[in-house]
Amino acid sequence: MSSMATMPDETAVFGEPKYWQLRTSLLKAIDEDFNSGDILPNERDLAARFGVARATLRHALEQLELEGRLVRKRGAGTTVAGPRVDVSLGADGEGWPGVDLRDREVIDCATVPVTDEFADTLKGRPSALVHRLRRRQFSMRQVVGLECLYVSRAVVPSLSTRVPNFERASLMLRQLRGHRLEGRHRAVELAVAEAEEARYLERPPGTAVLVVTTTYTALGRTAAVTVATYRADTCRLAFAEAGPTALRPAS
Amino acid sequence: MSSMATMPDETAVFGEPKYWQLRTSLLKAIDEDFNSGDILPNERDLAARFGVARATLRHALEQLELEGRLVRKRGAGTTVAGPRVDVSLGADGEGWPGVDLRDREVIDCATVPVTDEFADTLKGRPSALVHRLRRRQFSMRQVVGLECLYVSRAVVPSLSTRVPNFERASLMLRQLRGHRLEGRHRAVELAVAEAEEARYLERPPGTAVLVVTTTYTALGRTAAVTVATYRADTCRLAFAEAGPTALRPAS
DNA sequence: GAGTGGTCTAGACCACGAG
DNA sequence: TCGTGGTCTAGACCACTCA
């Protein structure tokens, strides 16, 4: 738990930057001498031990944090991260979203003006209204993602008001499921969390996140869009695919 | 193209770090005053213009590069990135990989010892052999990803030798397609490119990449695994899903 | 060779968490 | 209150690209 080599690693490649060699050394140490949850020595000590400036050591730590191997907390310390959490996508009824309410916490559910980015896909004019349901997603009692579902008023005309958020959300989802789903499209890309998003994910702004954008087609139009944001350092997105019958046999 | 605000942004939130406010200012400038391919002023000028140390400015630029909004090249300069490239996954025959040979360049195809990470999934003992096909993937004449396909010898006993790489690969894929595909599983996660990987992607080590791991089941066992690595800054992974008939209608 | 981004240093101060 | 990681500075030198 505490050895942590200090001498220049024999695997060190000259010509590679110091912070990268350092990352390699640390990675090896993490794998061999540490377990999930173990606390690393503080940055000043580590830097001294490796004979580099603190900034250089930090550069190495930043890489390892991006890779999800370390968790750093201001005021607390740096710990070794556990294995990635599998987040299952596509298993929720193989269709409309939100059928599975386990591990999901409703943040709010309201009718709001469309944001520019969805004005086109939801075929709404700017200033048009859509329903928005925001939920936080958990896995193993840990926050892993933030899910934002936009629903066109063409498929769900109005929301019941005067009821709690959770109930309003349930009613909306029920109406959604009443329609026949005609198509679905998914895209995954990397982004960074802005301030508000970051707060919900309990991370600082600028944290790398995986954004899954799903568009749902019904009644011959784009009926709904969900934008789900997952912590890139702790999550693996698992796409449970259809069984054998849905797969085309060898042609 | 050249105005680029210098005064403290009125949207600046005190309490937010300088580099983050800077990122916001730069992002606004990129969106409003620049086009794809435009060259930004150099780092020293920019830092002076905003009245911050170069390191602080660089911190902001690093964020924007991670987001895929900027492209920085040593010795050359910093340019505004174009829109993300859509990489289509799941459209290749809805089954076995590599049916679509467009925009793919064979790097090599050989029988090699299994690496530890796949010894278990491919059910091979350490020191067992598997076939490995490595290909580079292009889109719009740009390198977007590196694809590594491992095939168990249980489904493809042996590779024809004494033929060029490309032909050997074709023959292997043909044999693969001869089997009935019984299942497929996909996972997406964030990683960073190591040295060799980075070279293939024409990026420096430490670059953020999206890794798509797909396992194929045939003959009641894991028959093949592909590990595809895509540049996280320039790619959006698009999952073309099955048409209406495969989607379960409203329950 | 001039100019660019990349690396590294040695310091300082700040914001937060835990005891 | 003290120790942690987070931010910021002002310099230096290096590696690369391009004219």
Image (cartoon, coloured by chain):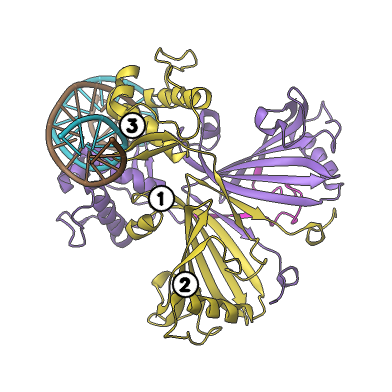
Chain colours: A yellow, B purple, C brown, D cyan
Residue A58 tag number: 3
Residue B223 locus on image (x, y percent): 79, 41
Q: At numbered mark 1, what does the secondary structure look like: helix, strand or loop?
A: loop
What amino acid does circle 1 point to? Answer: Glu
Q: Residues within 10 Å of mark 2 (few under 14, many from 20)?
A: many
- Residue closest to the eye, D14 or A124: A124
Looking at the image, which is closer to me, A129 or B2? Answer: A129
Span highlighted in magenta in the image? B84-104
| Residue A77 in magenta stretch | no
- Find the distance from the CA under tag 2 to the CA under tag 1: 26 Å
Give the residue at mark 2.
A133
B88 drawn magenta:
yes
Give the chain of mark 1. Answer: B
Tag 2 and tag 1 share a subunit: no
Point out the tag, 2 or 3, that comes first from the N-terminus.
3
Above or below, B217 against A10 in this view is below
Q: Quadrant of residue D1?
A: top left
Residue A133, x across and y down, in percent: 47, 72
Q: Quadrant of residue A183?
A: bottom right
Q: Residues within 10 Å of mark 3 (few under 14, many from 20)?
A: some
- Callout 2–callout 3 Cβ contact below 8 Å: no
Evaluate if marks 1 and 3 touch, with contact meaning CB atoms under 8 Å apart.
no
Looking at the picture, which amino acid does disc 2 mark? Leu
Q: Position of residue B232 (x, y in %)?
A: 49, 47
Alpha-carbon span between mark 2 and mark 3: 39 Å
* Numbered tag placed on residue A208 in the rendering: none
**Would you name the residue on which mark 1 appears?**
B67
Q: Quadrant of residue A186?
A: bottom right
Residue depicted at x 71% and y 65%: B242
Mark 1 against mark 3, which lies toward the viewer?
A: 3
